[in-house]
Amino acid sequence: MYKKIGILTYFWTDNPGTFLQAYSIQEAYRRVLVDDRVEVINYQSFRWRWRPNFSHMTVGQWKRDLTRHAKYNWCRRHRLNLTPRRLVCEDPAKAWRFLSAFRYDLISVGSDTLLELWRTKADGVTAYWLNPEIPARKVMCAASARATQFTDLCDGQKDYMRTSVRDFDLLGVRDAATYELLRCLGVNGEKLRVVPDPTFAYEIDPSHADAYFHKRGITFDRPTVALHLLRQMSWAGELASSFRAMGWQVLSLRPAAYADYVVNDISPFEWAGLFGACDLVITHRFHDTVFSLKNKKPTVVLVPNRDRVTTSGDSKYHTCKRLFDFDNVQLIEDWTRVSADEVLEKGLLAFRNHRPEPMETKLQALKEAFQSYIKRVADLLN
């Protein structure tokens, strides 16, 4: 008799990192649980409605938005093994009843920032803090609470969350901040550990990006920088112009008039290989950072806002910097206090000091660490 494994994670937005972390976990479990049923639970903790990008309204941009959305819908239908039953609900109690009805042998919570407490009542929790009454073994897999801290919690939240985590067999978290939160909730010992983001185990197929570039007529006969900047970053156009004046080509992953090419009409699989064709990446997105590093490229990371950082100064961006050292990752903690010239200097410093060889060793270690954790979860079912 096969066993049933349900993966509880984000998957429904048109976000490449979100999609690929769900896909990577699904495929990791499938590789070690070949005789069992692994599925992504079709639960959305909030209602997300697609809409075109209104910050850069052109006919070309609307066409790219529609193309991207169609690609993501295809990927969700054909690459994720979603449960036929679906629930969209912010009420944890209703979600827990929905999860109980599947009668899973094991529920895996994560990856992504599922454990943060946004979209909840002031004294509430999200459904991802599983109720002990759900009849299944429970694990976390690279789950994150982003910058949620123990001191942010009210007494009722602390009491419930302690009860929830005690019922988990394994607690694999993605970052030091979440590790510290669970430690403050009374978790210690072998069942709590930091687990790499599942996308570190994803094998990039560059042919998807190559086909996309060919279709768009994008060539790489000069140095290329990939930018993913917030529209509030008023210095973005000046930064792009500075790169262009030095003979660089500028790609943008969001709508931007300053780019030579806007490349936001891509599928998650095309996006994964895009960074490999670039010489430098400057971004505010976590999974851009991960896949830039997976493609062994120098990276400048801009922390998008201070609520992503704990009071002790830690975040998922800092975790990447620690993992891949100062030469390969330049971190800008407050983008509101820098100029285009300063960002340019950081980018050129990362480019000049880039050392890809040590990155290969680190990437292999992260891949093996994630796979080792998945095997440990599989052992619970055996």
Image (cartoon, helix red, strand yellow):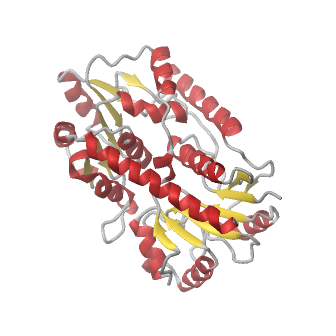
User: Residue 326, position in %: x, y?
Assistant: 22, 52
Q: Quadrant of the N terminus?
A: bottom right
Left or right: where does residue 37 sit relative to residue 300?
A: right
Left or right: where does residue 47 sit relative to residue 16?
A: right
**Viewer-nearest residue: 108 or 144:** 108
Q: Quadrant of the C terminus?
A: bottom right
Q: Evaluate whether residue 207 shows in this view.
A: yes
Residue 247, quarter of the rendered image: top left
* Residue at x 31%, y 48% (from the top left corner): 302
Q: Is residue 244 placed above or below 183 in the rendered structure? A: above
* Residue at x 62%, y 82% (from the top left corner): 163
User: Residue 182, position in %: x, y?
Assistant: 49, 76
**Viewer-nearest residue: 349 or 232:** 349
User: Residue 263, position in %: x, y?
Assistant: 44, 27
Q: Evaluate whether residue 55 shows in this view.
A: no
User: Residue 214, position in %: x, y?
Assistant: 46, 15
**Viewer-nearest residue: 76 or 154:** 76
Q: Is residue 210 placed above or below 72 in the rendered structure? A: above
Residue 275, quarter of the rendered image: top left
Residue 262, quarter of the rendered image: top left
Total numbered labels placed on residues in the image: 0
**Viewer-nearest residue: 83 or 171:** 171
Q: Is residue 57 placed above or below 341 in the rendered structure? A: above
* Residue at x 43%, y 34% (from the top left corner): 254
* Residue at x 49%, y 73% (from the top left corner): 192
